[in-house]
Amino acid sequence: MNSHIVKAYDEELNHLTAEVARMGGLAEAQVSEAIASMARRDATLAQQVIDRDLKIDALHLDIEHKAIRLIALRQPMADDLRRTVAAIKIAQDLERVGDLARSVAKRGLGLIDGEPLTPLTRSIERMGKLVADRLKDVLDAYSAGHAERALQVWRSDEEIDEHYNALFRELLTYMMEDPRTIAACTHLLFMAKNLERIGDHATNIAEQVHYEVTGREPEGARPRTPAPAAPIDEPGRD
Amino acid sequence: MNSHIVKAYDEELNHLTAEVARMGGLAEAQVSEAIASMARRDATLAQQVIDRDLKIDALHLDIEHKAIRLIALRQPMADDLRRTVAAIKIAQDLERVGDLARSVAKRGLGLIDGEPLTPLTRSIERMGKLVADRLKDVLDAYSAGHAERALQVWRSDEEIDEHYNALFRELLTYMMEDPRTIAACTHLLFMAKNLERIGDHATNIAEQVHYEVTGREPEGARPRTPAPAAPIDEPGRD
């Protein structure tokens, strides 16, 4: 290969990584704004989050298309192939994060006309902030190519699960004490589940970053809270 | 290219498609058995479904690896590239179907020690059978390379959504009438949601089959039930 071709190839690869980082920034903003729209009962903001998801979907398709083209035309090896495959996989996770943020915003819309359930929505907001922070951390690790920072996110997934389990119990108690809140609480239940799943995607991305940088999966089992089986308990991760 | 290389290439591509079909067969069985384990309150079967999901995950990684290798080494064009990309995407959907079936089995385990909620579990069973049939239909269409049959699955997604919405209302009514069932009903609620999401993946696969065979997306908007916004209603698809 002459240096002209090598340069074009490097540029394509850098462009791909930059596009994934940009998609990450959008997904992160969608999560934060979905939570904010729920907390402030802001229908306009919720609708914006819902509409903006199309942009994330379009970016996803574009990244996938470019990555496959790059593999077919440039036949990247070793590090470069890992980088390209990581871009495809991280974009997939981000696309799902976008869908989940849209779903949080939609469920928030469904709650606006009802009575505010302030203690519960505060708990959801706290969990949402935690999840948005994790997503931010792992995207920073991706942009910096920093395996150790990715590993920190990977290890902290348990904290999100604990939050989710506590919230699940809080919601059940609320519903049992006042059955009139059941319909609204099921929305909050799905919201909490969606946030937990966004946390899972952050963990997936952390694994991809670690693999891209080091060529290895993180060592040890993926940290997860044990799943109790009694009906009152959440069986944890889906 | 000489005929020897062409033959090896065709064989690789056929092998890839066959592996995706095999993964589809496994995923379909997991969905049916997850539902059966819930209906029969069979803990052994539920645990088998949970354990077998690892096999689907391993197949997924293998297919992805082979498809990327094929793109890099053989640089497939037009129809062949579409076939390879479709294999990657369908395998992704099937991997998620496997996760969702595992989750249904886990939630079924959580219900075994409680009182049977027979009318509700019957409704879940009916919805589960409908979803498993859709998955079977779309996998048949994939194996046969049959765009029209895939389109039929794609068009029938609405029926699953209607089932889900009816089940959602049934569950809410149950919880409100007897708050002691709330904990168990939340499991059934997530199960129903998981089945609806399996239906979504069947629809995704139908789109991929149509694209692989014809080179075009199915025409018209993706059929979906309109999303009512009142708190009592489900905002539909996530």
Image (cartoon, coloured by chain):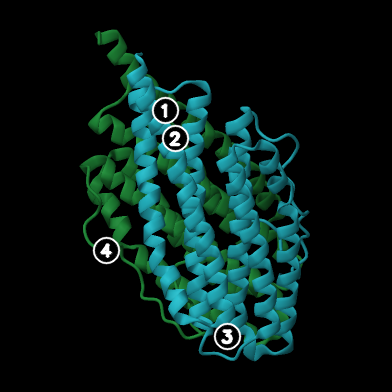
Chain colours: A green, B cyan
- Circle nearer the viewer, 1 or 4: 1
Picture residue at 47% right of the left edge, 57% below the top: B26
Q: Position of residue B221 (x, y in %)?
A: 74, 40
* Pointer 3 local density, CA inside 10 Å: few below 14, some 14–19, many at least 20: some
B216 vs A146, nearest the viewer: B216
Res. B200 visible in picture:
no
- Circle nearer the viewer, 1 or 3: 1
Query: Could you tell me how far apart the alpha carbons at marks 2 and 1 are, in whole angstroms?
Result: 6 Å
Q: Position of residue B167 (x, y in %)?
A: 72, 71
Query: Could you tell me how far apart the alpha carbons at marks 2 and 3 are, in whole angstroms?
Result: 54 Å
Res. A219 visible in picture:
yes
- Which label number is shown at residue A221? 4
Residue for badge 3: A173
A81 vs B10, nearest the viewer: B10
Residue for badge 2: B14
Whether residues under marks 2 and 1 lie with C-beta atoms below 8 angstroms apart, the answer is: yes
- Which label number is shown at residue B10? 1
Please state if A216 lies on the left or on the right of A172 as rendered: left
Looking at the rendered structure, the kind of residue marked 2 is Asn
Please state if A64 lies on the left or on the right of A9 as rendered: right
Query: Could you tell me how far apart the alpha carbons at marks 2 and 4 are, in whole angstroms?
Result: 35 Å
